[in-house]
Amino acid sequence: MTKRIFITGIVQGVGFRPCCKKVADSMQLSGTVKNLGGNAEIVIKCDNRVSEEFLRRLVSLLPKEAKFYSVDITNTKEFTGEGFSIIESGEDDRFLPEIIPDIATCDKCLNELENKSDRRHLHPFISCAACGPRYSIINKLPYDRENTLMGKFTLCKKCEQEYTNPSDRRLHAQTIACKDCGPRLEWKGKEVASSPIDSAITVIKNGGVVAVKDIGGYHFVCLADNSLAIDKLRKLKLREQKPFAVMFNNIEQIKDFGFFGDLETELLCDTSRPIVLIEKKDDVLESASNGSRFLGAMLPSNPVQYMLTKELGTIIMTSGNISGEPIITDNKTMLEIYESSPYLDGVLYHDRDIITSLDDSIYYVLDGKSHIVRRGRGVAPASIPVNLGEKTVFAAGSDLKACLGFYKNGKAVLSQHFGDLEDDGCALVYKKSAEHISALFGFKPDVTVSDMHPAYFSSKLSEELYGIGSVKVQHHHAHIASVMAEHNLDAVLGFALDGTGYGENGEVWGGEVLLCSGKSYERVAHLKTVKMCGGDELSKNAAESLACYLIAGGMDIPDSIMPKGDAEIVAAALKNNINCVYSSSCGRLFDAVCCLLGFGNYNFYEGQCAVSLENAASFATKKGILAYPLNLDYNKDELDTVKLVCDIKKALDGGADAYALAAGFHLALAEGLTKVAKHQNMQKIALSGGTLNNRILTLLLKEKLTDAGFKVYLNEKVPCGDGGIALGQLFIAGKE
């Protein structure tokens, strides 16, 4: 009797076929295993009982990255060969393949890296069948060496023996290489030591900034406790104030700098090796964190990073790009920056190309659950199971924090984070990635879906790529739909709180309460619509936002907020409708209150004022400062944020503590939104939008709603910001 076992799931790039070979040999079974499209087919000479035992042993041997979505066992024609072998891959487009994200270096490879007697001692590209680059180097499926960028490196005799040896853990390890036959590190810099990596270490130790080519692109690296080096890095990246992530050598080291629990530890040690936002201890790494109460902590994900942190300790490891531009992946561009910039002291690079650029993924933990801020290396393009019908759908996502997506056969595949598409470089990477992912997965969409904003690049591109008119979806509806898709919800009351989104009435929305059912929604309430001026500068200039709120409330603009002449210009612009919009943005509300309370008047990076206001509220809690009692009135379909801002000003003028008012603002907003929920006949509440990255507001809102008897749902697998928009678009289009 011969059985055919067809398995769908994550079965390529995780050492699946070598594991099959080891189990079959241990059971003295004859047959074959091969990649079939993105899945796997096993043919084995045995009966039902033995096939079940084979699968049981196989599952126990596989690494945790492997996942079975379905296992189909059928009888097939008799196998007449002897022994068990791995055979040539085949094609099969019936099922959506799974492409494994890049995997951090495993413990066995790290032991070899440290072992002076091992032939791969300090080999910067050490990997095996269970670890190493995957998505970033694959050209096409199936996942075989010749279909990856490793195909250009001819194996030496020793590696060839390991690659074909059934008892070796590098059996059919597609990234196998050694110092003799693999990629090579090179160094370009002011200091030259015994090796390229020692040269980089010397420069960094001496306060320099070095560009290091990693798996998904370049990083800029310097010491995390050297303020002069960090200042140089800020000038290089044109990143004046935004905090930097810090890489540590091990978990124990991180404990000296921040507070975190078991779930954060699990995330930090996960094979995706993301950045994890933890609560920072006071007075540590101030130059790197720049006022943030959180520290972006990460552990090494590849051999070069392990070697760097072992010698250097805590280092800044930030995306190798100029602020706002895509991460750099090619050596030529980075070497040109080195030649032209006084702030870059060296380049540590290698001769393996990168097909797919990948920023680091980012997570945080809230109320016992993990939430993703950015999908990147180690996460993309892992699929999300959702049931959206029979159509194949392409979703363009948003122009800000762009992330595109596809849906087919019960799975949503979301790309990595691209950045903001207003940058030409980011837009080009977005377009190339859409084409690459389409080819890689074999996507041919029946439907395309995009944001209804008439000027979005992503919307135009979706029609250009596939020649199909897009279904247009309102931005905040997509935010709420992303939560519905994650949690398999048919109907919810959604609170979409963010900076901006194009509303159906042509206004700028951003503080919306939507009653959503299936593919449809009704806007049942929103933050008060305020007339604002300033164009694109408005999202940066918090003082201008505050001025618009005060004018709407009939109050004068104090000189401490804005010089009299500037205030008169704002008033005239509003009166004469010059460069004006009507906005219900929650982001602009946070900007206004932050400026009013004196915690910041300009966003040097997105959301900076909102972060500062949240920090102030957190400080009040830590110091035992009671929240100042404020009320957010709810009249008909509006929450009166203009009155709220005016009330805060009156309280501040009367001597109220600014920190108490910051805490009171967060509480008033949560209580006001809960009032709205009580007026609607819906017990399931979905919270989404970039403002929900504010942990204080999210926890208060969840607490108030839960106490009132509501069931609250949040984004977990996709960002609550615009990086999750594509999933919501897929959900809505799938309901068409």
Image (tube, rainbow, N blue to C red):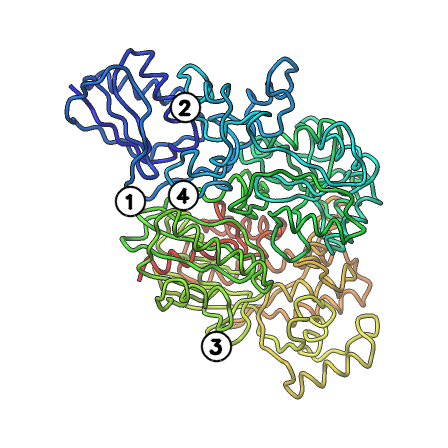
For this view, does 536 lie left or right of residue 374? right
Q: Secondary structure at mark 2?
A: loop
Callout 1–callout 3 Cβ contact below 8 Å: no
* Crowding near the residue tagged with mark 2, few <14, some 14–19, many ≥20 C-alpha atoms within 10 Å: some
Mark sitting earlier along the chain (4/1): 1
Q: Position of residue 238 (x, y in %)?
A: 74, 56
| Image vertical order of residue 237 relative to residue 550, above or below | above
* Crowding near the residue tagged with mark 3, few <14, some 14–19, many ≥20 C-alpha atoms within 10 Å: few
Mark sitting earlier along the chain (2/1): 2
Q: Secondary structure at mark 1?
A: loop
Q: Which mark is residue 93?
A: 1
For this view, does 40 lie left or right of residue 152? left
Q: Which residue is at 56% across, 39% downward?
A: 352
Q: CA distance from mark 1 to mark 3?
A: 43 Å
Q: Position of residue 83 (x, y in %)?
A: 27, 15
Q: Is residue 379 visible?
A: yes
Q: Position of residue 620 (x, y in %)?
A: 74, 49
Mark 2 highlights which residue? 62
Q: CA distance from mark 2 to mark 4?
A: 24 Å
> Considering the image in quadrants, where does the C terminus appear?
bottom left
Kindly indicate the quadrant of the structure image that contains residue 640.
bottom right
* Crowding near the residue tagged with mark 1, few <14, some 14–19, many ≥20 C-alpha atoms within 10 Å: few
Q: Secondary structure at mark 3?
A: loop
- Closer to us: mark 4 or mark 1? 4
